[in-house]
């Protein structure tokens, strides 16, 4: 199988949609020899917001020790192959194709049709054989997520839980938190990021009898236009390069994981300082100043507003937004309109996309000056003397980066 053929196969699987439950994934893994249960030092991350950033911090610190590290995350923003990484590098297209060929043969032998996410997850499990650490990010929820076929001891991280994917995971914080906690098994060490009281209560209940670490709260947080500093208990003046008022809290969760694994403070500090995670309050350009953020639910919209107000007090922004129809786009308009000098809306290249026209209408209702535009026009609306902030689905951000680059 060639890389092109493997991508065509994945595209065909995407059209078949999501297969609920773990039954099909367990059959596929069994046929492949259950590679997931041979992985070492698995760090399984679930949550609504912050999974990718926490994973990036952990990955960078572990790599600083010289260890071999596999990392599986989704969705892709810049290159499809970035979802599966080993030692800081994306999987090679031909290697991916060879793994997908094995998975296709195994699926046909079991007479099953895996979802695209199941096939990608299986590829990651096969690829990470021999790694000293494996960082695995749940795709949706936790209990029924394809990544949750791991039965061995692991560290389970629950990042910030909020309302998202409510048609699948539940209509309340408590129901969603319970789904996330489904990644626990009887050999799990649990690390918990800062939570609402409702989510924390559920997590404590679900983790009863397991070793649980609640991440410390960052203190003395300060910002510049290129760095963030904070204290975390006895660790003072920690430096990170990921922007956003929420990032010290993600870093705190990563520190708890790394300390539980016995990683030295020097490697932790170096990892936090050097971690990179594109598309999350990311400075795309300094002149003109352009920010891109993958905010796509109510909590993330609030965090985006807090970050913009913290880094650029008193400023108004040119917003460029593209979201999916199943997201709380009305919340985006209510929360961000007060900071808008102008809003341009686009229709993401996604079958679940909300139309640019409808999103512009929501911002207009909230008092913003909003117009729908074609995504090809993004480069023409950026002004040298204004701050542009793009937000929304990661599939839209990919196109935004391309437009800015051009």
Image (cartoon, rainbow, N blue to C red):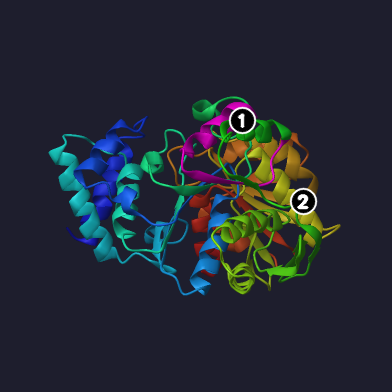
Q: Quadrant of the N terminus?
A: bottom left
CA distance separating discs 1 and 2:
31 Å
- Whether residue 306 is visible: yes
Residue 397 as seen in the image, left or right of residue 198: left
Residue 205: which disc?
A: 1
Residue drawn at the location 25% of the way across and 51% of the way down: 8
Reply yes or no: does residue 194 show up in magenta. Answer: yes
**Residue 213 at x, y percent in the picture:** 63, 48
Q: Which residue is denoted by mark 2 in the rendering? A: 306
Residue 130 as seen in the image, left or right of residue 394: left
Q: Which residue is the extreme one toward the right?
A: 314
> Magenta segment range?
173-196
Question: In front: mark 1 or mark 2?
Answer: 1
Q: Is residue 403 above or below residue 66?
A: above
Residue drawn at the location 64% of the way across and 37% of the way down: 162
- Whether residue 382 is visible: no
- The one nearer the camera, 216 or 119, is 216
Q: Is residue 231 above or below residue 48?
A: below
Q: Which element carries disc 1, helix, strand or loop?
A: helix
Q: Classify residue 202 by image quadrant.
A: top right
Q: Is residue 85 above or below residue 9?
A: below
Classify mark 1: residues with Cα within 10 Å, few (<14), some (14-19) or many (20+): few
Residue 335: which disc?
A: none
Q: Which element carries disc 2, helix, strand or loop?
A: helix
């Amino acid at each position: 199988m060639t890389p092109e053929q493997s991508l065509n196969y994945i595209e065909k699987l995407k059209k078949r949609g999501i297969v609920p439950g773990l039954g099909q994934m367990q059959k596929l893994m069994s046929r492949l020899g259950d590679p997931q249960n041979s992985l070492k030092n698995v760090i399984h991350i679930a949550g609504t917001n912050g999974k990718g950033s926490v994973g990036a911090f952990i990955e960078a610190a572990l790599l600083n020790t010289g260890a071999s590290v596999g990392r599986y995350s989704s969705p892709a923003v810049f290159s499809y192959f970035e979802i599966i990484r080993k030692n800081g590098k994306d999987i090679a297209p031909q290697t991916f194709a060879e793994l997908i060929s094995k998975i296709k043969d195994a699926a046909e032998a079991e007479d099953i049709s895996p979802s695209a996410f199941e096939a990608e997850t299986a590829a990651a499990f096969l690829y990470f054989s021999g790694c000293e650490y494996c960082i695995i990010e749940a795709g949706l929820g936790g209990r029924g997520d394809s990544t949750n076929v791991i039965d061995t001891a692991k560290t389970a991280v629950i990042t910030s839980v909020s309302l998202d994917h409510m048609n699948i995971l539940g209509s309340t914080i408590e129901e969603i938190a319970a789904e996330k906690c489904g990644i626990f098994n009887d050999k799990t060490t649990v690390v918990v990021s800062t939570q609402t009281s409702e989510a924390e209560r559920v997590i404590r209940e679900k983790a009863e009898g397991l070793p649980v670490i609640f991440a410390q709260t960052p203190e003395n947080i300060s910002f510049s236009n290129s760095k963030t500093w904070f204290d975390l208990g006895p660790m003072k003046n920690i430096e990170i390069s990921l922007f956003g008022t929420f990032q010290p809290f993600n870093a705190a969760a990563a520190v708890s994981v790394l300390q539980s694994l016995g990683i030295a403070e020097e490697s932790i500090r170096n990892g936090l300082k050097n971690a990179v995670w594109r598309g999350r309050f990311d400075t795309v350009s300094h002149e003109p100043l352009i920010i891109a953020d993958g905010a796509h639910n109510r909590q993330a919209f609030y965090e985006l507003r807090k970050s913009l107000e913290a880094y650029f007090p008193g400023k108004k922004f040119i917003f460029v937004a593209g979201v999916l129809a199943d997201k709380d786009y009305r919340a985006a308009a209510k929360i961000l309109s007060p900071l808008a000098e102008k809003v341009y809306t686009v229709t993401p290249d996604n079958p679940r996309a909300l139309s640019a026209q409808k999103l512009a209408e929501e911002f207009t209702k909230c008092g913003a000056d909003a117009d729908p535009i074609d995504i090809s026009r993004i480069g023409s609306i950026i002004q040298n003397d204004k701050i542009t902030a793009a937000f929304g689905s990661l599939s839209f951000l990919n196109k935004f980066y391309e437009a800015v680059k051009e």
